Amino acid sequence: MFTGIVRERGRVTSVDERAEGIRLLIEAPATARDAAVGDSIALSGVCLTVTAAENGTIAFDAVPETLARSSLGALRAGAEVNVEPALRAGEPLGGHYVQGHVDAVGSVRSVDREPDGGVRIWFDAPREILRYLVDKGSIAVDGVALTITHIDDAGFAVALVPYTLEATTLGSTATGDSVNLEVDVLAKYVERLLKAK
């Protein structure tokens, strides 16, 4: 379980393609210091298992299923990723419930600078997840817990404050970029319960 509060921006040091997927090596010193083999860590919103952690770097394996459902397969050495260790008992829930299970890959429609120093980003999203979005509701974009400010027939918008732009990879987002999207899991449970009736 995660909260969508990014703890560190990591850097991809290598991507090793294998028959069973890829091995990612991520430089993330603050996270690596406390990471152990078997821990769950979210990389840009994707929950992965630590396979090694040493010298400020963490290794992860991503299987074909993960690569097919997320943007991780497009990562190359030098790319930045949002890093969040799993929530520990007793820690504050600063964002919203995030599972690290990507629902869809969306794309950046536009990035607009606001007079107050913030940025409004519009994302296009697949139709199958649009039904879960509500005005002022929660969504995780590349693992960052955000509040939806606008919705239209093709996607949604969020407003980012300067801190989020600096502390996450969203500050360097450009039109056309792919992003991992995870809707609020509570909406999916409500839908399932209503269908059962």
Image: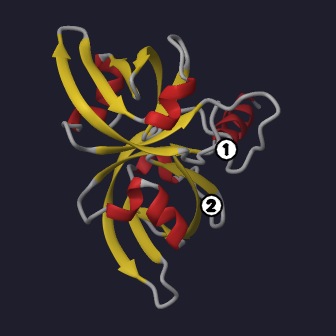
Residue 179: x and y, percent? 36, 49
For mark 1, give the secondary structure: helix
Give the Cα separation between the discs numbered 2 and 1.
Answer: 10 Å
For mark 2, give the secondary structure: loop
- Neighbourhood count class around disc 1 (C-alpha, 10 Å): few under 14, some 14–19, many 20 upward: some
Where 84 sits versus 119, above or below? above
Could you tell me which residue is drawn at 53 percent across and 11 percent down? 38
Answer with mark 2 or mark 1, whichever residue precedes in sequence: 2
Q: Which residue is farthest right?
A: 90
Q: Quadrant of residue 122?
A: bottom left
- Quarter of the figure with the N terminus: top right
- The answer to whether residue 65 is left or right of residue 167 is left
Residue 113: x and y, percent? 39, 82
Where 52 sits versus 127, above or below? above
Mark 2–mark 1 contact, CB under 8 Å?
A: yes
Residue tagged by mark 1?
187
Residue 65: x and y, percent? 34, 20
Q: Which residue is farthest top?
A: 19
- The answer to whether residue 157 is left or right of residue 67 is right
User: Could you tell me the amino acid type at mark 1?
Assistant: Ala
Residue 150: x and y, percent? 53, 72
- The answer to whether residue 100 is left or right of residue 21 is right
User: Could you tell me the amino acid type at mark 2?
Assistant: Val
Residue tagged by mark 2?
134
Where 3 sits versus 120, above or below? above
